[in-house]
Amino acid sequence: MLAPVMALALGVCAQSVDTALSDFLGELGKAMKQYPKDAELRGKLTGVAKTKFDTALKDATQMEKPGWDFLSDMLNDLSTADKKFGTEGSKAERTLWVAACKNAFTRRLTFAKEKELTGDEAARTDKVFSDLFDGVGKAKKRFGDTSIDLRSAGYQAAKDIFTVLLKNARASEREPSTVYAEQLTRIDKSFPIVTETEKKGNSEPNGVLKTAAKSALDRAIAANK
């Protein structure tokens, strides 16, 4: 919260993350409209827009919210890519937009309410994992098997929230190894990777969740010491 306060003290009006992202989207749209067939000139305009966005994002403000609320924001932002940049001719702008969404999410996550919680206020490891499981499921459902770049970005965002919240998480009240075994079973049941079709759609979420389950196990063991 220090950066926005300093900006105000210096007479600088810091933008919100939402405003910075919205302005960038508008600039991308203008560039595409102004130079629909000239990729080089369009690229120069979007390059300037990106620099402006990156600068604004450094001090951008954000209201504190639960960390997982920021995943919903991220998925909504990402969905714009299919609406605005779904054609072959807008691949460059799509790439810029997805990267901007990722950076905006990273900035927002610094304002997660739970990130400083410790002791009895912190969530337990199995709850943090369960929330990740739900988050990964939302990303997969939102983007299906077509918008792979958006789906992967959603998985990464969910994993980032998990990492932040797991840092101070309390151990599960149950035996960690039992919880871990149950989590692995749940993962393989919900995201099976037996057939080639299943592997194509589920390998990424299956891998993300199994890695996270092991991290949660390690944290639970460490927290019990």
Image (spheres, rainbow, N blue to C red):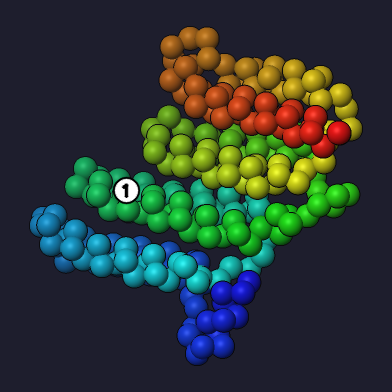
> Is 92 positioned to the left or the right of 207 in the image?
left
Q: Is residue 209 visible?
A: yes
Q: Is residue 41 above or below residue 156?
A: below
Residue 114 place in picture, x, y as percent: 73, 55
In what quadrant of the picture does the C terminus appear?
top right
Which amino acid type is shown beneath numbered disc 1? Thr
Q: Is residue 102 above or below residue 206?
A: below
Q: Is residue 94 above or below residue 183?
A: below
Residue 52 place in picture, x, y as percent: 34, 70
> Is 69 positioned to the left or the right of 85 in the image?
right
- SS assignment at label 1: helix
Mark 1 Cα-neighbour bin, 10 Å: few <14, some 14–19, many ≥20: some
In what quadrant of the picture does the N terminus appear?
bottom right
Residue 87 place in picture, x, y as percent: 25, 45
Residue at mark 1: 95
Residue extending furthest toward the front: 225
> Is 168 positioned to the left or the right of 52 in the image?
right
Q: Residue at the location (49% across, 27% down)?
A: 204
> Is 103 positioned to the left or the right of 210 in the image?
left
Q: In the image shown, does 65 or 216 lie closer to the viewer?
A: 216
Q: Is residue 130 visible?
A: no
- Which image quarter: residue 134? top right
- Which image quarter: residue 88? top left
